[in-house]
Image: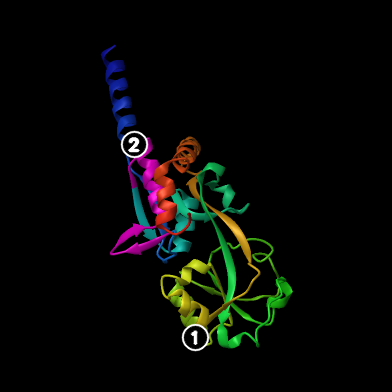
Amino acid sequence: MRVFICFCLLFFSSFKAASIEPVVISHSKGNFYPFEYVEKGEFKGLHADIIRGVAKQLNIKVTFVSLTWMRSIKDLSYGWIDAVSYFSYTPERAIYAEFVPGNILSSTTTWPIILAQDKQRILFDGTIASLRPYRIAVGAGFKYGEPFDSAKGLLKVRIPEPSPQKLVDLLKFKRVDIIITAKHSLRQLFSPQQIKQTFHIFDQPIATNPVYLAFSKVKKHEVLAQRFAKAMSEFKASEEYRKLLVFYGEGE
């Protein structure tokens, strides 16, 4: 009987210790304002504040780690981390990641952007075929949406950690003809007037993609993912969330 009691105490103390371990969430080293960026070594942005707010509701401690994008994908697939922020769905990723609709952090629309001086030289009519003559900068391991991701015959230049500054430099130094990014990514570098004078953003977007806080299937985080999704839905109905949208320029 004494052995049984000792076993139970050991089991429950181990369970308690495991339950208070922080949830390790990776984010990219790149800056994708206003959703995710690093300022003075701290992870900030709309996604960061949403995750912190939801974790607070659930009384869960989270630890953010800054990894290269390819490292984040690898670590999640092996179960070395608990979750990845800013993660787009693909059937291949769904093998090792939990994509729960309630864990959608935001939706990102990406656009083809060129230098204003190239407006007459580079033509895009909204079709994938019209992009084929040009060198296009894309993030290594990034998913933009269909039909762009699976399109054949495009001259995609894959850039590790494609920060807005890195993309702009590629354009200015003629390493590529087109960059694919969200409009707001230019805001952290330029004023609205500078953007209008320096760049041409085509009217037709590449795609609009929901991005998730995706949890590890390898670590059997289905229940955790569902808990987060329920709490995130509640958080997005709150006044705190509406204030965040206004603060980051994503709401009225």
First in sequence: mark 1 vs mark 2: 2
- In which image quadrant can residue 19 be found? top left
Q: Residue at x 69, y 78 (%)?
A: 132
Is there CB contact under 8 Å for labels 1 and 2? no
Q: Is residue 219 shown left or right of residue 209?
A: left
Q: Which residue lies under the disc numbered 2?
A: 59
Q: Residue at x 73, y 74 (%)?
A: 129
Q: Nearer the viewer, residue 85 or 239?
A: 239
> Which quarter of the image is occupied by the N terminus?
top left
Q: In the picture shown, does residue 7 fall above or below 228? A: above
The structure's colour scheme is: rainbow
Q: Which residue lies under the disc numbered 1?
A: 172
Instruction: Tell me if I can see residue 162 in this picture.
Output: no
Whether 104 is among the magenta residues is no
* Position of residue 94 measured from the top left corner of the image (x, y, whole percent): 58, 48
First to last magenta residue range: 36-62
Whether 48 is among the magenta residues is yes
Q: Nearer the viewer, residue 222 or 88?
A: 88
Q: Is residue 67 shown left or right of residue 111?
A: left
Q: In the picture shown, does residue 171 fall above or below 37? A: below
- In which image quadrant can residue 148 be found? bottom right
Q: Provide the secondary structure element on which disc 2 rests.
A: loop
* Position of residue 192 measured from the top left corner of the image (x, y, whole percent): 47, 74
* Position of residue 40 measured from the top left corner of the image (x, y, whole percent): 28, 64
Q: Residue at x 26, y 14 (%)?
A: 2
* Position of residue 25 measured from the top left corner of the image (x, y, whole percent): 40, 50
Q: Residues within 10 Å of mark 2 (few under 14, many from 20)?
A: few
Q: Nearer the viewer, residue 176 or 200?
A: 200
Q: Residues within 10 Å of mark 1 (few under 14, many from 20)?
A: some
Q: Amino acid at mark 1?
A: Lys
Q: Amino acid at mark 2?
A: Asn
Q: Provide the secondary structure element on which disc 1 rests.
A: helix
